[in-house]
Image (cartoon, helix red, strand yellow):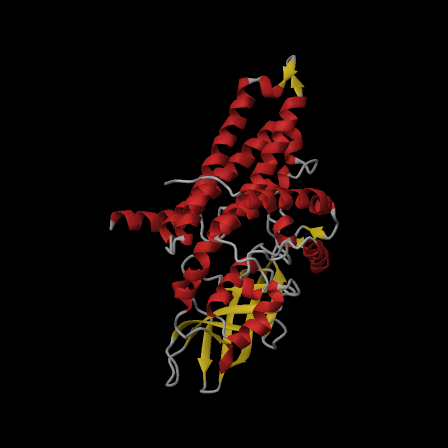
Amino acid sequence: MIDFSIPAERAAERDRVRQFVIDKIVPFERDPRLTAQGLNDELRQELVELARAEKLLTVQASVELGGRGLTHVEQAVLYEAAGWSTLGPVAMNCAAPDEGNMFLLSKIADPEQTAKYLQPVIDGHQRSVFAMTEPGGAGSDPNQLTTEAVFDGENFTINGRKWLITGADGAKTWIIMARLAANPHLPEGPTLFITDGDTPGIVIERVMSTMDRNYVGGHAVVNFDNLVLPRESVLGETGQALRYAQLRLAPARLTHCMRWLGAAERAQSIAIDYAKTRTAFGKPIGEHQGVSFMLADNEIALHQCRLTIWHACWLMDQGEKARHESSIAKSFVSEELFKVTDRCVQVLGGIGISDETVVEMIFRDMRAFRLYDGPTEVHKYAIGRKILR
């Protein structure tokens, strides 16, 4: 049996989330604290408190950690509603990178690490970082990891350089990927470490100037300069970082898709309203076939994207890893939603490239989405290898 229905209780919550975002969050889209490098921590905290007051904060967390223990499909329904504003997921504490980091830590952190590093993120009191990407290539291909950790039997000393580290400026919970050098004490290889962002040796060189601006603190260049961490800073087992990264990335790809689907819907709604009222050559532009066909293509794409996301989520809810399906979803949805927002800009004409509406901001952010958690080409490469085996 195939059932595409949304239970009444979840549909009601979806509608409540959407209305919360429209009423309470959308007005902040022109707040000066939303800068060219993303929103600052003061604005984030204000948004988080609004969601907390509505009992909509970190709903995806397990019941034991204070959330509602949502399934992946349930997350898809609510994250899409939250994505109506790019600030919605920030307010509800289900935005990247925190959402993916919370998921990973909930799977591999020990009780002490959970209390110190995970629970404050779930509670909305601090942010987190996943420091993997490097200038030399480690990112989509983490095998190129050069940041090194040396273990002397008591402490690890980490040296290396990272960039495009989202939210690094001001984050407290840091997950760091480094290659553990051969030693007589522990298995070597890529390893995850967890520490506080104020630890000496973590040096934020600069925040990069990028075209997207929906993440708190932007994307930073970070140096690890003789960062010394104790043995208990290891996340999980040494040498297993790539396996843990995959554990994080499959659901994270999908949550990106969920949130940006909501943003694309917002752009479509703005384009539709404009097409109904803007006139040209004696009638509303929506009555011209060229415009109506673009809006129709958008509606088809939004529907296809939603079903693709739901299917991958359903597989994960059945206990499957769904790496293949999540790669399909990430590559397809990111490309299709970019086309949707591009057509919305076209329908809006001159105001589409201005900040008269949020479509221009959504368009820039959507372009970056084609790169987040693996560019389309890397996912297609993985899909191709899978089908040719």
Residue 62 lies, in percent from the top left, at 53, 62
Q: Residue 118: image x %, image y %?
A: 57, 68
The answer to which image quadrant residue 59 occupies is: bottom right
Nearer-the-camera pick, 331 or 1: 1
The x and y percentages for residue 111 are: 52, 75
Q: Nearer the viewer, residue 321 or 357?
A: 321
Residue projecting furthest to the left: 389
**Most foreground residue, 56 or 384:** 56
Residue at the spot x=65%, y=12% of the render?
282
Q: Is residue 199 left or right of residue 231?
A: right
Q: Residue furthest front?
A: 8
Residue 270: tell me if it is visible.
yes
Q: How many marks?
A: 0
As drawn, 302 above or below 173: above
Quadrant in which residue 349 is drawn: top right
Task: Please state, as top left, top right, bottom left or bottom right, where the N terminus lies in the image.
Answer: top left
